[in-house]
Amino acid sequence: MKIYSSVAAVFCCLAVAGCSTHEKEMSALVNGSLHTAAVQSERMAESLMDRPDELPRTIGKDGKLMTSKSNWWTSGFFPGVLWYLYEAEGDDSLKMYAENFTRRVEKEQFTTDNHDVGFMLYCSFGNGLRLTGNEEYAKVLLQGARSLSTRFRPQVGCIRSWDWNRQVWQYPVIIDNMMNLELLSWASKYSGDPKFAEIARSHADVTMKHHFRPDHSSYHVVSYDTITGQPEKKNTCQGYAHESSWARGQAWALYGYTMMYRETGDRKYLDHAGNVARFIMDHPRLPEDKIPYWDFDAPDIPDAPRDASAGAIMASALIELSLCTEGDFSKRCLSVAETQLKTLSSPEYLAEPGTNCHFILKHSVGNYPGKSEVDVPLTYADYYYVEALVRYKRDVLKENMR
Ligand code: GLY
């Protein structure tokens, strides 16, 4: 572990002519937080070396580390955290751990019974491929894209998310599913086969049409009639109410359409991401520190739990959105993301190394109505927080990685 990396980065910034006080402060914050995250994540990895098919998930009700097997939707996030930290810090030990935990997810390339293949594989193998060029990783990703594509039905124009609860939903599509489209976009570029990207565009277009309310907030679950292809129900599963705005759902929408603009260059996705960003940033119940309550309409605000995972996903997406927009809107996106990074990097959210069962962040909400994972660390909060820090360091501060 390079203990001087954050200090070195600050000196590097100080040495650059024209580096403002704000940039120096953000550089110190980002590099210090990346270093804390690396210390925690190495300890997490070390603690699981003798449990070779387990991946970190959260802290259980007994106060102990709760892991999952690779088939749980969050399995790819910890390998992804390790890849990003290797990118930022450059330690060989981080790379060794990243390779080890990435291999643990490999068999999910054949998963066809849910839509989470993109989360599982693109965060793990996708980052691994980006940083190493390992062609074996590309083969796994391409098979994963084939598996995910089996869940697309032209009649609906979307990838089916879930197979459970068939008595209630004919063909459920959840807003989270936007995140799986990045794998399909990659697969078309890599293989030259346009069908994956066509599925991604169709899914994004149909979701844009049916998942959003006039104020640009998103439903969680839209179920389609399999014969007509039209929506039959607009529901929630993890939010407060069918008509409420579940915070992580809004974050998935923001991230998903920003990513689709990057992948396609189609302006309608950028405009839509901008509208979702405005819904979030203008919301009267978004707190000053910019970490949302678990649902924007939770009835017990301001006593409702915050969701650091939603804040981290929003921060990562807003950094990207700020870089592909201009003027006051771009500045506002970056400013909100900076506030989110500052809040998440404060002692209230960022765990002291050696605490929090080696997760990086505290205070996320997985499934409040299901009374599961309320006010706990979650591996995906860590992933999007570290991704946001890396994006800020690389794309905003333009500091060298490694
Ligand atoms: N994709 C599941 C969630 O956001 O909780």
Image (cartoon, rainbow, N blue to C red):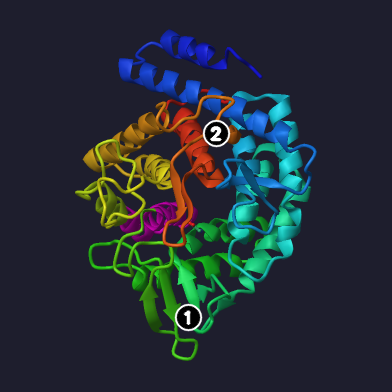
Proximity of marks 1 and 2: CB atoms separated by less than 8 Å: no
Q: Which residues are magenta?
A: 248-273
Position of 172 relative to 349 (above/below): below
Name the residue at 25% across, 51% down. 278
Mark 2 lies on residue: 356
Where is mark 1, residue-wise?
169
- Residue 127: numbered disc: none
Callout in the foreground (1, 2)? 2
Res 39 seen here: yes
Residue 146: percent from left, percent from top: 68, 67
Residue 337 % position (x, y): 35, 37
Number of other residues with Cα within 10 Å of mark 1, as a class: few under 14, some 14 to 19, many 20 or more: many
Three-letter amino acid code at the position of disc 2: Asn
- Identify the residue shown where x is 26% and y is 54%: 279
Q: Is residue 305 left or right of residue 74?
A: left
- Percent across and percent down for residue 185 are 56, 59
Q: Mark 1 and mark 2: span between their CA atoms? A: 37 Å
Local packing at callout 2 (Cα closer than 10 Å; few below 14, some 14-19, many 20+) is many
